[in-house]
Image (tube, coloured by chain):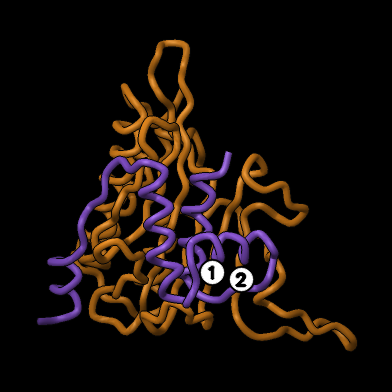
Chain colours: A orange, B purple
């Protein structure tokens, strides 16, 4: 069975946090990912933090900022190890570090066990409106555009190839591919 | 000092926190938008539209505390 497994909850959370931190710091940002593990419980959150406050991290040699937030859970296996899964993610790319800046691209996922919504669990938002046919104006910040599972690797790839973020390492593509291989082993998911 | 080096020097990794400490973190972030932790969580629960990544983070932290 694939899975990101730890001998205890904190070890499983640290494995993911450390993996993502190395990937992000090797490719697009120097900001450090923080892990907040709710002590003695099976839950944790990761995001970039400056002191105690979360930040939208500056990406390398660009004027864009990236917020990453994930809520994680672990469940105990029959062999007494702990298996991790992401139950929520929020990725946001914005043009300022402003904490209430809403002019951004947003990718989100919320598992049904966290919030039982009717809309697509994996979705995308952006600002503005789209006119669909003669009578419908769709507010793009409100509707949940289906996206499928979006990995942090794909966000990094998007930033480098589409919006001019300069990779910190010329081997960025290899780093992403290696990270995606690890993701496949952990999740059993194809990307 | 560049923004990048500032980030590198000041961001600290956080470890295991008690529920009260997570609530305190929510309070720190809520203060930035002029609210207490309790007011921020009530606002999220009410479904009132909120703006910005700080609310994403408050929401994720609040979700950590929920049963």
Q: In which chain is the residue bearing label 1?
A: A
Residue A149, above or below B48? above
The residue positioned farthest toward the bottom in the image shown: A134
Left or right of residue A116, residue B37 in this image: left
Residue A27, above or below A177? below
Which of the 4 quarters of the picture holds residue A68?
bottom left
Residue A83 spot, x, y in % from top left: 43, 27
Label 1 Cα neighbours within 10 Å, binned few <14 / some 14-19 / many ≥20:
some
Q: Nearer the viewer, residue A4 or A183?
A: A4
Q: Which residue is drawn at 65% across and 59% down?
A: B45
Q: Residue at x 47, y 77 (%)?
A: B34
Q: In which chain is the residue bearing label 2?
A: A
Label 2 Cα neighbours within 10 Å, binned few <14 / some 14-19 / many ≥20:
many
Which of the 4 quarters of the picture holds residue A12?
top left
Left or right of residue A48, residue B64 in this image: right
Mark 2: which secondary structure? strand
Left or right of residue A93, residue A126 in this image: right
Q: Nearer the viewer, residue A74 or A182?
A: A74
| Residue B5 visible from this viewpoint | yes
Which of the 4 quarters of the picture holds residue A185?
top left
| Residue A175 visible from this viewpoint | no
Q: Which of A86 and B48 is in front in this view?
A: B48
Circle number at residue A125: 2
Q: Do labels 1 and 2 share a chain?
A: yes
The reply to whether dot 1 and dot 2 touch (C-beta < 8 Å) is yes
Q: Which residue is drawn at 31% across and 46% down?
A: A17
Circle number at residue A60: none
Residue A183 spot, x, y in % from top left: 40, 41
Q: Name the residue under label 1.
A: A106
Q: Which residue is drawn at 40% across and 81% down?
A: A98
The residue positioned farthest toward the top in the image shown: A79
């Amino acid at each position: 069975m694939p899975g990101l497994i730890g001998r205890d909850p904190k070890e499983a959370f640290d494995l993911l946090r450390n993996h993502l931190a190395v990937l992000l710091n090797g490719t697009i940002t120097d900001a450090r990912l923080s892990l907040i593990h709710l002590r003695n419980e099976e839950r944790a959150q990761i995001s970039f933090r400056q002191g105690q406050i979360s930040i939208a991290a500056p990406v390398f040699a660009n004027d864009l900022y990236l917020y990453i937030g994930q809520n994680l859970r672990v469940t105990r296996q029959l062999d007494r190890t702990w298996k991790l899964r992401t139950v929520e993610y929020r990725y946001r790319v914005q043009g300022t570090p402003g904490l209430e800046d809403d002019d951004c691209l947003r990718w989100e996922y919320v598992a049904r066990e966290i919030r039982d919504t009717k809309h697509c669990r994996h979705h995308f938002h952006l600002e503005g409106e789209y006119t669909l046919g003669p009578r419908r104006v769709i507010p793009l910040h409100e509707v949940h555009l289906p996206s499928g599972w979006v990995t942090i690797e794909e966000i990094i790839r998007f930033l480098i190839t589409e919006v001019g973020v300069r990779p910190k390492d010329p081997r960025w593509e290899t780093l992403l591919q290696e990270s995606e291989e690890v993701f496949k082993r952990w999740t059993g998911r194809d990307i | 000092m560049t923004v990048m080096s500032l980030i590198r020097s000041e961001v600290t990794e956080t470890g295991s926190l008690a529920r009260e400490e997570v609530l305190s973190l929510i309070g720190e972030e809520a203060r930035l938008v002029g609210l207490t932790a309790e007011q921020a969580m009530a606002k999220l629960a009410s479904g009132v539209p909120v703006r910005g990544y700080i609310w994403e983070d408050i929401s994720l932290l609040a979700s950590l505390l929920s049963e």
